[in-house]
């Protein structure tokens, strides 16, 4: 899609390991922005419903179907590409998006498998060129705090040992621009820090800050 100038919505992304509070915080932020008159939608990746790849990804995560590790990595990436035109359309129409997971999860979960030939550089390649988020909020939960949380669900990656490796992979991906929030604080404390930053980003995007591309 052609790059457009002018006022637009903001792309605000939440990343972190399973059980770090992303879903709670995405929905709180979307509601807060809405109450301040910002047009906003909540999205999440993988999109398991409205995509060609979503069904296969869902079966894989549920443990009903196995896949080659490179193939499933590419399906997760394709799932984002499938949604990328709609994502840009939404932003250009002035709608802000609060998004639960994106390409950083894609790289962290696949790189955490530590398979030969599947290093972070290989994992990043298929997502290069996707619309980049305007703000990445990383909810940081250390190993001990994560272990103290209520149990995981039954999905493929929801095992403490693997989550520790995902957390280490996220540390490698972290960029200086990320808003890193201590996820062991109260829901309200976390929300307040994120809202203040999100409002500034929404304002900058309304002023026409261009959309960047991932890992270009
Ligand atoms: P969810 O728990 O947020 O629904 O995400 C589903 C799982 O898929 C979660 O364990 C993280 C993992 N995942 C990947 O492995 N690659 C990806 O690209 C994305 C977006 C998620
Ligand atoms: Mg999960």
Image (spheres, grey):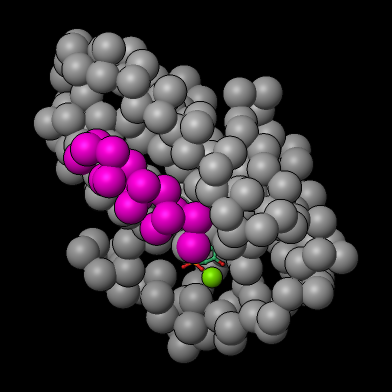
Q: What's the residue at 69%, 83% (across, down)?
A: 151
Tell me: 5 left or right of 138. left
Q: Residue at x 51, y 30 (%)?
A: 197
Instruction: Find the residue positioned furthest to the left.
Output: 93
Return the residue nearer the eye: 18 or 105: 18
| In the image, residue 112 lies in the stretch drawn in magenta | no
Residue found at the very far right of the displayed protein = 144
x, y (%) of residue 105? 56, 51
Q: At 35% across and 27% down in the image, what residue appears? A: 202
| Residue 207, position as x, y percentages in the image | 27, 12
Residue 170 point in image, percent of width and height: 69, 45
Question: Which residue corresponds to the image point at 49% horizontal and 62% vertical from the top-left?
Answer: 24
Q: Is residue 210 above or below residue 130?
A: above
In percent of width and height, residue 148 lies at 80, 74
Image label count:
0
Of residues 101 and 125, which is closer to you in this image? 101
Is residue 85 positioned above or below 214 on the image? Answer: below
Left or right of residue 23, residue 130 in this image: left
Q: In this view, does 95 lie to the left or right of 117?
A: left
Q: In which quarter of the image is residue 104?
A: top right
- Report which quarter residue 186 is drawn in: bottom right
Q: In the rendered view, tell whether residue 24 sits above or below residue 209.
A: below
Q: Identify the magenta region.
A: 24-39
- Between residues 170 and 29, which one lies in front from this camera angle? 29
Q: In this view, does 27 lie to the left or right of 34?
A: right
**Is residue 79 visible to us here?**
no
């Amino acid at each position: 899609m052609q790059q457009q100038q002018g006022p637009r919505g903001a792309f605000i992304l939440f990343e972190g390991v399973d059980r770090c509070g992303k879903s709670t915080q995405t929905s709180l932020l979307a509601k807060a922005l809405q109450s301040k008159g910002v047009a906003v939608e909540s999205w999440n990746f993988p999109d398991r419903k409205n995509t060609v790849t979503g069904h296969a990804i869902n079966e894989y995560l549920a443990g009903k179907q196995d896949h080659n590790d490179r193939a499933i990595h590419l399906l997760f990436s394709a799932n984002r590409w499938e949604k990328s035109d709609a994502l840009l359309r939404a932003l250009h129409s002035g709608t802000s998006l609060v998004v639960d997971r994106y390409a950083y999860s894609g790289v962290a979960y696949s790189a955490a498998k530590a398979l030969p030939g599947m290093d972070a550089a290989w994992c990043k390649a298929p997502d290069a060129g996707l619309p980049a988020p305007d703000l990445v909020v990383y909810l940081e939960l250390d190993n001990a705090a994560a272990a103290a949380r209520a149990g995981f669900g039954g999905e493929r990656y929801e095992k403490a040992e693997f989550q520790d490796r995902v957390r280490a992979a996220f540390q490698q991906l972290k960029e200086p621009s990320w808003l890193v929030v201590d996820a062991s604080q109260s829901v309200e404390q976390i929300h307040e820090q994120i809202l203040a930053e999100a409002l500034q980003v929404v304002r900058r995007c309304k002023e026409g800050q261009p959309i960047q591309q991932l890992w270009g």
